[in-house]
Amino acid sequence: MSGPLPSVGPPVPRPRVGKKPYAVRVRNQRQVVDYALQRRAVLAEYYSGRVSTLDVCDATPYLLRAARFHGTPSPTACPVCRETALTNVAWVYGDELRHAAGSARAPEELDRMANRFSEFTVYVVEVCRSCGWNHLVKSYVLGTGAPNPPSRRTAGQ
């Protein structure tokens, strides 16, 4: 059996020289911490009856409002009320953010901030808008990774 191998499918197009593969810069999450084990422990305490519903369903009105306006729907159902899907809310913290530190941000805003600031931390909290269940899901660091430019105050000293 000699001869060329049969073609399996259409040829794979090669990228054009000089073109970037992505038009938008992809977010680079680093220093990711997952809190799944802690979540499981809290839920085990709740299901065993050692912790009351009031202890685990204690979302503040500010967190519920942030979930409503800045949250993204999650496919996971609430582990407490089991009625509604959870909403993930991303909170940002960092020295460089100044007035924006400690605020909830939508994923589109995180992309813009990751290209603008050198480093900030994102904390993702899952929230049930029905019963008030909330728990920290994960945290990670975003940003360009470039060193901070000297501020005007410290540059002249």
Image (tube, rainbow, N blue to C red):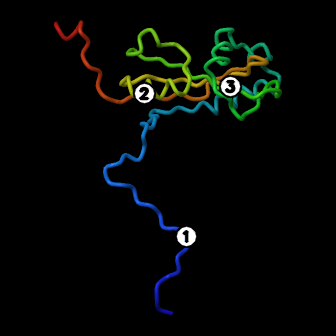
Three-letter residue code for mark 2: Ala
How packed mark 3 is, by other alpha carbons closer than 10 Å (few <14, some 14-19, many 20 or more), is: many
Contact (CB < 8 A) between labels 3 and 2?
no
Quarter of the figure with the C terminus: top left
Q: Nearer the viewer, residue 34 or 10?
A: 10
Q: Which mark is residue 108?
A: none
- Does residue 18 appear left or right of residue 25 in this picture? left
Read off the residue under disc 1.
9
Read off the residue under disc 2.
114
Q: Nearer the viewer, residue 81 or 73?
A: 73
Provide residue 95's location: percent of width, then percent of height. 39, 14
Secondary structure found at label 1: loop
Three-letter residue code for mark 1: Gly
Provide residue 94's location: percent of width, then percent of height. 43, 17
Provide residue 151's location: percent of width, then percent of height. 26, 12
Three-letter residue code for mark 3: Thr
Which one is closest to the eye, mark 1 or mark 3? 1
Read off the residue under disc 3.
87
Residue shown at 42%/40% (left/top)?
23
Tell me the CA gap for discs 1 and 3.
42 Å
Tell me the CA gap for discs 3 and 2.
22 Å
Q: Nearer the viewer, residue 40 or 126?
A: 126
